[in-house]
Image: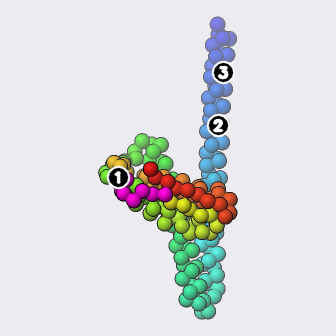
C-alpha cells in the first residue's frame, strides 16, 4: 500500500514537472518572440537616428521628413507592442475592463487599414477593402475591436508573399 501511494505521488510529480516544463518552454518562446518583435523596430529607429546624427548639418529637409516618418511609424509599433503585452497581462489576471458602446465597424476597419497602409506598401502587398456603404454598428469595445483588426492586418501583411493580395471584407 505504501509503495502504491508512493508510485501515485511519483506519477503526479512527474505530471506536474512535465506541465511546468511545458509552461517554461512557452515562456521562453514568448520572450524570444517578443525580443524579436521589439528588436526589429528598435534597430530601424537606431539606424535612422544614427544617420541623422552623423549628417545633421547636411540633411535635406525632404530626407529628414522621410526619416522622421519612419522613426514615428516604428515607435508606434513599439507602443502597440507594449499595449498588447499590457492587455494580455490584464486578460490573464482577469482585470481587463471593457467599455461596450455603439461602434461603427466600417470606421474601425478603414482606420486600421490606413494605420497599416505603410506596412502593406513596404511589403509590396495590396490590401483590398470591401466595406459596405452603410455603417455597420455593433455594441462592442471599440479599442479592442481596433486592436484585433490591426493585429489581423499586421499578420496578413507580414505573412503574405511580396506582390500578393489581402482582402478585408465586412458583410
Alpha-carbon span between mark 1 and mark 3: 54 Å
Q: Is residue 84 left or right of residue 35?
A: left
Q: Which element type, helix, strand or loop, lies under badge 2?
A: helix
* Residue 5 in view (yes/no): yes
Between disc 2 and disc 1, whose residue precedes?
2
Q: Which residues are magenta?
A: 130-136
Residue picked out by circle 2: 22
Residue picked out by circle 1: 137
Between disc 2 and disc 3, whose residue precedes?
3
Q: Within the magenta stretch, is there residue 135?
A: yes
Q: Quadrant of residue 17?
A: top right
Q: Badges 1 and 3: C-beta atoms under 8 Å apart?
A: no
Query: Residue lying farthest front?
Result: 133
Vertical relation: 5 (above or below) 45: above
Marking on residue 105: none
Residue picked out by circle 3: 11
Instruction: Indicate the position of residue 43 as horizontal and vertical percent values.
Output: 64, 69
Amino acid at each position: 500500500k505504501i509503495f502504491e501511494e508512493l508510485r501515485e505521488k511519483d506519477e503526479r510529480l512527474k505530471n506536474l514537472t512535465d506541465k511546468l516544463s511545458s509552461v517554461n518552454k512557452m515562456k521562453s518562446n514568448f520572450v524570444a518572440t517578443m525580443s524579436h518583435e521589439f528588436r526589429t523596430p528598435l534597430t530601424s529607429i537606431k539606424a535612422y537616428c544614427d544617420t541623422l546624427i552623423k549628417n545633421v548639418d547636411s540633411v535635406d529637409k525632404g530626407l529628414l521628413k522621410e526619416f522622421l516618418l519612419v522613426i514615428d511609424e516604428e515607435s508606434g509599433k513599439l507602443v502597440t507592442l507594449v499595449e498588447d503585452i499590457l492587455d494580455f497581462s490584464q486578460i490573464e489576471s482577469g482585470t481587463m475592463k471593457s467599455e461596450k458602446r455603439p461602434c461603427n465597424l466600417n470606421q474601425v476597419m478603414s482606420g486600421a487599414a490606413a494605420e497599416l497602409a505603410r506596412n502593406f506598401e513596404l511589403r509590396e502587398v495590396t490590401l483590398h477593402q470591401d466595406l459596405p456603404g452603410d455603417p455597420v454598428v455593433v455594441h462592442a469595445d471599440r479599442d479592442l475591436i481596433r486592436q484585433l483588426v490591426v493585429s489581423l492586418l499586421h499578420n496578413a501583411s507580414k505573412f503574405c508573399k511580396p506582390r500578393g493580395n489581402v482582402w478585408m471584407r465586412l458583410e
